[in-house]
Image (spheres, rainbow, N blue to C red):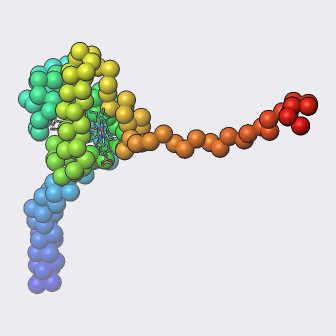
Amino acid sequence: MSKFLSFASVCALGAAFAFVVAPGHLQSQEAPPAGAPPKSPWVEGSDSRPAEQAYMNIKVFTGLPANRLEFIMKSWKDSLGVQCTFCHIKDEWERDDKEEKETARHMKKMTDAIVATHFDGKREVTCYTCHHGEKKPAKNPPPAAPVKRQPRPVQPGAGL
Ligand code: HEC
Ligand code: HEC
């Protein structure tokens, strides 16, 4: 009998453990259930509220319709030839831990200023104009390929 009781109490403990601990454990892992679609970073395509209302940490894109941020982020990624995680911590897009993210804000203000001051507000200069798919734009042209010079043809009788 006492053997049976201890077996029962172990079962009860086990069940209690599963109930109390398991859900908390699952939550703290934050892993999406297998087969679930990955969480989108973006607002709904119809969401045209100002970006600062729809997103958590907007400083330079204030007033931009929120549904346009996706296009801009993708073009920044391609303009610099990097992944999103060059500026961001994956899935925690609002965080400012990376220096590159702050540099990008600075670059955005600089590009706006160039456009406003020198191109009548027309978007003639973009990130790509300088970056061309590189993190750091090249400062100088690449060294010219060596030119193989042809010997100059000698005119018969000239100066000989
Ligand atoms: C060159 C750096 C850079 C790259 C690359 C980049 N981002 Fe961003 N991202 C930023 C900056 C800067 C902001 C903040 C803009 C502001 O302050 O208005 C931002 C903001 C965001 C936000 C809004 C977060 C919030 O809630 O405040 C999301 C979402 C986001 N980025 C996703 C992405 C994704 C996804 C990619 C890749 C497709 C990407 N970004 C590529 C620099 C970058
Ligand atoms: C007028 C030219 C020019 C434009 C336009 C420009 N950049 Fe840059 N950017 C540079 C230069 C030059 C550097 C490298 C500075 C250095 O070597 O320290 C740089 C560096 C950066 C870096 C740091 C890269 C690293 O390796 O740490 C980021 C991020 C960046 N730019 C983002 C942008 C974004 C986003 C845009 C568009 C909003 C943009 N830039 C537009 C010239 C430009």
For the point 19% across and 39% down, which residue is it? 106
Query: Where is residue 41 drawn, in percent x and y?
Result: 24, 37
Please say if 45 is above or below 106.
above
Whether residue 45 can be seen here? no
Residue 148 in view of the camera: yes
- What's the residue at 72%, 41% (across, down)? 148
Q: Quadrant of residue 107?
A: top left
**Residue, far right:** 156
Quadrant of residue 154 in the image? Answer: top right
Which image quarter is the N terminus in?
A: bottom left
Seen as rendered, the residue at the extreme front is 159
Viewer-proximal residue, 34 or 20?
Answer: 34
Q: Quadrant of ligand 1?
A: top left
User: Relative to 2, is 128 on the left or the right?
Assistant: right
Q: Position of residue 134 (x, y in %)?
A: 40, 41
- Residue at point 37%, 34% (across, down): 130
Question: At which x and y percent is residue 33?
Answer: 27, 47
> How many numbered callouts?
0
- Look at 19% across and 44% down and name the residue there: 102
Task: Give 80 or 130, whichever is nearer the viewer.
Answer: 130
- Judge whether 5 appears above or below 138 on screen: below
Quarter where residue 108 is shown: top left
x then y, percent, for residue 110: 22, 33
